[in-house]
Image (spheres, coloured by chain):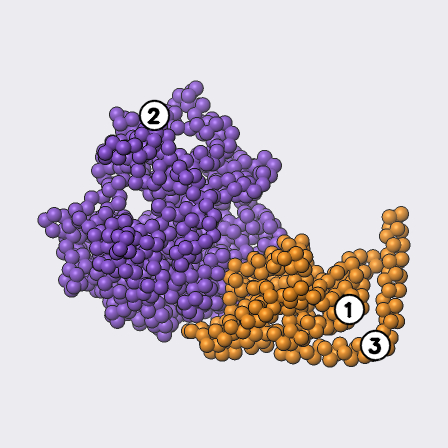
Amino acid sequence: MAQVAMLIDLSKCMGCRACQVACKEWNDLEAETTKNRGTYENPPDLSPNTWTRIRFQEDVENGEVRWRFFKEQCLHCTNAPCVAVCPTGALKNHAMGFVSYEEELCNGCAYCANFCPFGIPRMKVVNRLTGEAKATKCTLCQDRVTNGYIPVCAKTCPADAISFGDRETILAKGRKRVEKLRAGGSRRFPDANLYGADVLGGLGVMYVLPEKPEKYGLPTNPESALTVVSAWKEIIQPLGQLALGVGVVSIALNWVVTRRRVTEEQEA
Amino acid sequence: MTNHWIDIGNADVIMIIGSNAAENHPCCWKWVERAREKNGAILISVDPRFTRTSSIADIYAPLRSGTDIAFIGGMINYILENELYHKEYVVEYTNAPFLINPDFRFDPETGLFSGYDPERRQYDRSTWTYQVDENGVPLRDKTLQHPNCVFQLLKRHYSRYDLDTVSRITGTPKEKLIEVYEAYAQTGKPGKAGTIMYAMGATQHTYGTQNVRAYAILQLLLGNIGVAGGGVNALRGLHNVQGSTDMCLLFHILPGYLKTPIEKDQSLAQHLERVTPKSNDPQSVNWWKNYPKYMVSLLKAWFGDAATKENDFGFNWLPKNSGNYSHISLFEAMFNGVIKGLIVFGQNPAVGGPNANKERKALEKLDWMVVIDLWHTETANFWRRPGVNPADIKTEVFLLPAASFVEREGSVTNSGRWLQWRWKAIEPVGDAKPDMWITNQIMREIRRLYRTEGGTFPEPILNLTWDYGDGLPDAEEVAREISGRALVDLKDKDGKVIVKAGQQLKNFTQLRDDGSTACGNWLYNYFTEEGNLAKRRDPVDRSGIGLYSNWGWNWPVNRRIIYNRASVHPVTGEPWDKEHPVIRWDPVAKKWVGDVPDGGAPPGTILPFIMKPEGVARIFGFGRTDGPFPEHYEPWESPVRNLLSKTQINPVFKLWETEMNPRGDPDRYPIIATTYRVTEHMQAGGMSRYLPWLVELQPEVFVEMSEELAAEKGIKSGDQVIVESARGQVRGVALVTKRLKPFKVNGQIVHEIGLPWHYGFMGLATGNSANLLTPHVGDANTMIPEFKAFLCDVRKA
C-alpha cells in the first residue's frame, strides 16, 4: 500500500473551522457545551469529543496585526512515541503511513497521552463505575482512508488549505509552496518552512508554516520525546513478556470487576 | 456579480471591501487562492476590523465604518492625478467624454448637486443631463478636455479627496491609503484585471448605493468591467438571493427587472412610453428598447387567454406602485396599525430587522401573522419574548412548518447569476411542506373565496392563470412557464415557422409584443426544447478561463461575464488581456469565439454596454436619487462632522422621525458600532442556533473592542458588557482584541466596536440581537437599513 500524507497549509487557512465540524459529523462526536471566553476559539481544548480544532492566536509584529490559525490534531508520526509505549497494540503504525487506532484493544493506560510530543491524545472515561477509560485521537479518518476516500477535514476545507494524497506528491507540494512563500510577492514569508518532513521519522500530517514553528506552539525538537520513550522502554524491556502479561491480567481483572459491578447495579 | 465565483481566480488584484468574504463566503476562498497561486494576485482587505479575511490578505487597510466613498473617492483622485486609468477604455466605453448640461452644478461648500429641494429632501434632476446634437445623440469630446465633459467634472469633484483629507475622514493611515491605491491602480494597465468583492458592508448605509457606484466608477476608470478577473461583484448572503431578486422579491420591480407600473401609467401604452428607453445613436444597441416584448409576454404568462390586445393584456390588473413598500416602511405601517396581517416566508425580522424592539412591537399590533419556517423563530414567538406578557398580545399567530432546501426541488441562482437545478434529496420531515405547496393552497383558497363571495376588483385574482393542480406544483412546469413559450406558430419575416405553438422558446430574442408569446421572466430562458438547462453538469471547462459554459445555465443567454464586449479593443476585437480572453473576434470565420458576446455584431459596429441607451457605461450616473457622483456624507448617527462639506448626512434618504426611533446624541453615545455575521451562524440564526455543533463554536453574543477602549472602560476580555444605543441594549461577552484599533479622525480619537447580529431568545444559543440597537433609517435609493454604522456606548455589566 502506498504511503499517504496530509498537508495543512497555514498560509491558506482562514480559520473557518469547517474541518472541526466535519470531523465531529463524520466521527459522530458530540457537541460540547461552551462559553465565549473572549475569543473565537472553541472548544477550549481537545477532548474525547474534539479530535481536531483550530487554535486562534493574535499578535502584533512590526506594527502589523497577525491572526494565526493553527489546526491541532494527531500528526501521525512514523517513529510515534505513542505506538512505542502502547502496551496493547491499540495504536499501530499503519502501512499507509498513519497511526491507526483500535479502541477495543485500548486498556486505558494513558501512556500515549503522556508521551505524545504534541500533547494530542485525550482519555475518555467509558465506565464511570470502574473508571475504565479509552484513549481518543484523530485517526486520519482511517475508515475513509483505507477505503479510498480522503479524510473528511481535507474533503471539507473550502480554502484548499488541507491536501491529502501520496506522501511523495504531498512532500513535493509542500516544498514548492514553501519556496513560493519565501520568494513571495507583496506578502513574503522569509521564515516559511515545511514542518514534519523529517522529524520523528516523518510526520503523516505536515504543515506549511509561514512563520517559525514556535509561533504556532509547535515543539522545535519533538525528537526529545523519543529519548524519554527509549529510556522508559529500557527499564521495562527486561520485563518484556511479563509487562505484556501484566497488561493481559489487568484487562482480565478489569473485566471481572466491571462485570460484577454492572451485575450488582442491575440487581439493585 | 458582473462576473462569477470561479472568475475570481483570473484576477491580478482582489480588493475585498465592505465584505468579510473569508468569513461569510468561505466557499469562494479556493478561487481567491487560485488567483494568488496562478497570477501572484495581491489581496487587499479594507475593513473597520482586522477580520479573518484580513488575516490572510497581503494588505490590510482599516477604515472607519461608513467612509467608503471617501476611501474610494481618494483612489479615484489618485488615479486621475497620476494618469493611471485605462485611457482607451475610458474614452470609448464610458460616458467620460460626454458633455453635461451647462446648468449642472456641484457646490463643494454645501456638498449638494444642482436641483436640491431641502423641504422635500429631493433633487430635481433636470440639469443632470447630456448635451445632445440635432439628432439627439449626446455630444462627446474624446480629448476629455472640455470643461463640461464628464471626465473633467469627475476630476474636479474628486480633487477634494486628496490623501490628507481622506485620511482625516476615514481614519486610514496615509501610508496605507497609498499602499492600497498603488496596488489596485496597477490594474489600469491594459491586460491587468482587478476585482472588487463587496457585500453588506458596502450596501447597508444611507448611501449604500453610492458606495457601490464609487466601486463601479473606479472599475470603469481602470478598464476592469467586462474582463476576466474583473467586475463589481456583489457577494450574496444566501444561495438564492440573486434568484429572488431576479424574480422580483423587491417591491419596485417585476420579474426580470421590469418596472412596476405607477399611477400615471393608466394604459399599457403610457407605461411602455414612460419606461422604454430611446436612443438615436446608430451604434447603440439600446437593448431595453425590447421592453414591450418582455412586458406583454409577462402579462400573457400571468393572465393567459384573459389577456388580450383589447384589454391591454390585463395591464391594469397589475398593482400600481403608489408608495414605498420596503422593509422599514412596512414595519412602520404595521406599527401604525395600517397593515393588519403579515405572512413571513424565510425571514426572521424579530432578529434580522433594524430597530428590532420596534419591529417586535409592530408585530403586536397585527390582527394575524403567518410564519412559514423550519424552526420556531423569534418572529413566530415574539408574543412570548422576554419582558412581555403573552396575555396582553392579541395577534393570532400561525406557524406553518416549511420544507428545507434538501426536501424540495427547484432552481437556485447564485451570486454569479448561475441557475443550478436542485433535486429533492429526502422527503420533508413531519408535516413540513415546500413553500410552493403552501403558496398554491393559499392562492387556491383566495380564488375560491373571490369566486364564491366576490370582492372589490376580483379580476386580477380570477384572471390569473393558476393551474398547478391541488397539491405540489410541478417545479419543472413552473420553470417552463418562467422560461417562455410560443402561444401560436411563430414565423420569421419570410413566413417560415421558427417555433411551433406550445413549444419552448430558444431565448428572449424570440419574444414578441403582440401576445403571441408568454414568458414569466425574460432573463430566465433556461427551459428550452433541449430541456432544463439548469440541470446541466458538464465539469469540463473549454474556455481556459473557467467559464464552464455547460454547467447549469447563466442569465442572460448563458453569458458568464456580462459587458464582455468591453474586454476587447473597440476596433480590432482583440482582447486587452491575451492570456485571459473572454471573447475574441475571429476575422477569418467572422464571428466571436469564447463567452456569449454582448451582441454578436462585428467589432467597431456597436457600443458594448448594450443595456444603456447611450451604449457606454455611466461614470456620470444620473439615474440615482442622490447625485450623479458619489459624495461623502456621514452616517445618520456619527460622532464627527462631515469634513468635506456642510451637509452632514445624505440629503435625500427618508428620515423616519417616528416613535421608538430616536437618534443618538454623540455626547451620550460617542462610540461607533457596526454589526456583522460570523461563519459559524446563518443570518438570524434559525438555521444554525438549533445545531449543537455550530452552537459549540459560537455559543453567545460577543462584543469586539480594542484594547484601548477596554482599558478606558475598565473591561477585560471575557467580561459581560452592555452595549446601549438610543434605541436599545444588548448584553454580550467582551472580546478585547488587537484586531480593532481606535481611529484617528481629524485629530480626534474615535472608537468603534462590532458585534454579530445572529442571536435571539429561541434556539440553543440565545442572546440579544444586535438589531435591538440599530436604527430605522435606510439608503436613499434602495431603503436597505443602515446596519453598519450607528452610535452606542459600552460599559461593564
Residue A138 x/y as whole percent = 67, 63
Which secondary structure, mark 3? helix
Q: Position of residue B201 (x, y in %)?
A: 41, 57
Residue A237 is tagged as 3
Q: Nearer the viewer, residue B503 or B401?
A: B503
Comparing marks 3 and 2, which lies closer to the viewer? 3
Density class for disc 1 (Cα within 10 Å; few <14, some 14-19, many ≥20) is some
User: Which quarter of the rendered picture does the C terminus of chain B lie within?
Assistant: bottom right
Determine the image quadrant of residue B634: bottom left
Q: Secondary structure at mark 1?
A: loop
- How much space separates mark 3 and mark 2, taking CA atoms? 94 Å
Q: Is residue B219 left or right of residue B605?
A: right
Q: Chain of mark 1?
A: A
State which chain disc 2 sits on: B
State the residue at coordinates (61%, 59%). A150
Q: CA distance from mark 1 to mark 2?
A: 81 Å
Q: What's the residue at 53%, 53% (across, down)?
A: B681
Residue B305 disc label: 2
Q: Amino acid at mark 1?
A: Cys
The location of residue B647, given as percent across then percent down, is 28, 58
Q: Indicate the secondary structure of the residue bearing disc 2.
A: helix
Residue B380 percent coordinates (x, y): 53, 40
Which chain does tag 3 point to? A
Q: Residue at x 35, y 45 (%)?
A: B557
Q: Colour of chain A?
A: orange
Q: In the orientation shown, which residue stands out farthest toward the left?
A: B134
